[in-house]
Image (tube, grey):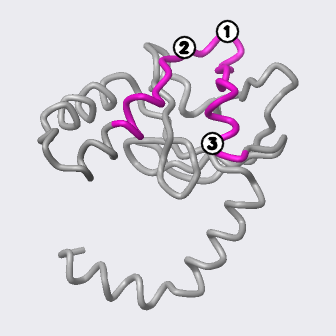
Amino acid sequence: MFLGEYQHSVDEKGRIAIPVKFRAALQKGAVITRGIDHCLFVYPIKEWEALAAKLAALPVSQANTRAFARLMLAGAMEVTPDRQGRVILPDYLRRYGKLSRNVVLAGLYNRLELWDATTWENYRKGTEKNGAAIAEAMHDLGV
């Protein structure tokens, strides 16, 4: 289970260190792909396989399902952490996420999200400001 926020930096080779507490879950490999809101999603390989199977089963006759599958699948890159727990972020994903040197890894239960630190800070502040309205909308979803 991934939880918490962690400040990191992207090195000159485009690598980021995975927090120590998450390394075991990603040891067998992970997939990094385009996420929503211009962040990157990082999935353990088992979680990715389950998601990819669901995406592959979506009807190709619907424009939104094709678009979402393309966003997630075409942008995906399989990675394996090195001995220091670092993974290489492909340039096209760094551009998509508008990642600067300073980044935030946010744990979201079954995945990590990788954000540019400034973008994350702005997003987090906006979400906190609208927390009550968001909580009410979540009630409608049974949360």
Q: What residue type is disc 1 on?
A: Arg
The nearer-to-camera label among 3 and 1 is 3
Q: Residue 109 in magenta?
A: no
Q: Position of residue 140 (x, y in %)?
A: 20, 82
The numbered dot on residue 96 is 3
User: In this rendering, is residue 106 above or below 86?
Assistant: below
On screen, residue 121 above or below 95: below
Specify few, some or many for label 3: CA neighbours under 10 Å numbering under 14, 14-19, or 20 or more: some
Question: Which labelled disc corresponds to residue 83?
Answer: 1
The mark that comes first in sequence, 3 or 1, is: 1
Badge 2 or badge 3: first in the primary sequence: 2
Check the picture and name the quadrant holding the C terminus: bottom left
| Residue at x 33%, y 45% (from the top left corner) | 67
Image quadrant of residue 25?
A: top left
How much space separates mark 3 and mark 1, taking CA atoms? 27 Å
Which residue is at the far top? 83
Q: CA distance from mark 2 to mark 3?
A: 21 Å
User: Which one is closest to the eye, mark 2 or mark 1?
Assistant: 2
The magenta-colored residue range is: 70-98
